[in-house]
Amino acid sequence: MRATFLASLTLLLTTNFMLLNSMAARAQTLVHVKRSDGRILALMVYEPSDTKDPAVAIISPGAGGTERGYSYLGEALSKDGWLAVVVEHPESGPQALAKAVRAKGLRDGLAEIVNNPQNYTARFEDIAAALQWVQKKVHPSFKALIGHSMGAITVQLEAGAQNKFHLHPQGGFDAYVALSPHGPGVIFPARSSETIRSPILMITGTQDEGLEGDYHWRMKAFEGLPSAGNWLAVIKGSNHMNFAGYGLGAVKTESVVVTLVTAFLDALKAHHQPLPPRLTGVQLITN
């Protein structure tokens, strides 16, 4: 793995431990819910100002991420009329990742978290608990699942991608967004997306490196998708942690991500075929 990817993950660990002890003043609410096994987890909720039964976007962080991350996306969706909820994933959060890294080093520790099927089963439970909380509060008109990195793997699994772990989550979302999608390898076979039936937006960047390859490897996740108005976007210069809001280039990446995500999801919510926007420095592929 390249040194830049390892350095980015080190930054993520450091930043998330800082976030556990401090929280910026933003239009957000922290709530706690109980999972089906009794475990308590946190949700960061971004509520729209004037929608009675809004569309709902559940956001799944990457390994080492927390419910306090991805505020740029939560805030943008809230302003766009969505109820956005960032979910805590305790089994693959900052403490779990730090423990694995201390025991095995950064690369192997990260792989231990990302390539453990039990962690995805737990993530499915987290998402189900978040949805249960949402549905007690509102009657969502449309449901989308968004995820980054390990969260993108979670999205691909929930969307119905074939996988070597033989996981079959409930799914049931109207649309999906995978930031830094996962190509074929330990988890997914080649053309794993052939079994995805709901619309999906995948976004990567030309510096978006992962455990098993660079952005070309990530782009392979798009192969085999049925023709259903899916998008694949490649942002020039964006690296892996830019999608989580960290590092040089994060502001540009955030702006592009927000534009793509809202354009894609708003069109689907309105029962329209999404029309891809023209953005400088973005290669956009549709099927």
Image (tube, rainbow, N blue to C red):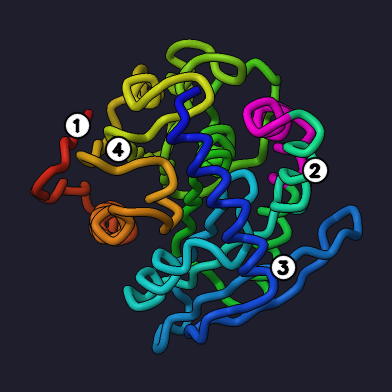
In the image, residue 226 lies in the stretch drawn in magenta: no
179 relative position to 38: left or right: left
Which label sits on residue 205? 4
Q: Is residue 192 above or below residue 32?
A: above
Mark 3, mark 1: which one is toward the viewer? 3
Callout 3 touching callout 1 (CB < 8 Å): no
Q: Look at discs 4 and 1 and give the one toward the viewer.
A: 4
In primary-sequence order, the first of circles 1 and 2 is 2
Majority secondary structure of magenta residues: helix
Which amino acid lies under the numbered mark 3 shown in the image of this protein? Ala
Mark 3–mark 4 Cα distance, whole angstroms, equals 30 Å
Dot 2 falls on a residue whose secondary structure is helix
Q: Are marks 4 and 2 in contact (CB under 8 Å)?
A: no
**Which numbered circle lies on residue 285?**
1
Mark 2 surroundings within 10 Å by alpha-carbon count, few (fewer than 14), some (14 through 19), many (20 or more)? few
Q: Which residue is mark 2?
A: 99
Mark 4 element type: strand
In the image, residue 130 above or below residue 65: below
**Within the magenta stretch, is there residue 120?**
yes
Secondary structure type for disc 3: strand
For disc 3, the marked residue is 42
Taking 191 as reference, is 169 above or below it? below
Left or right: 158, with 266 as reference point:
right
Q: Amino acid at mark 1?
A: Ile
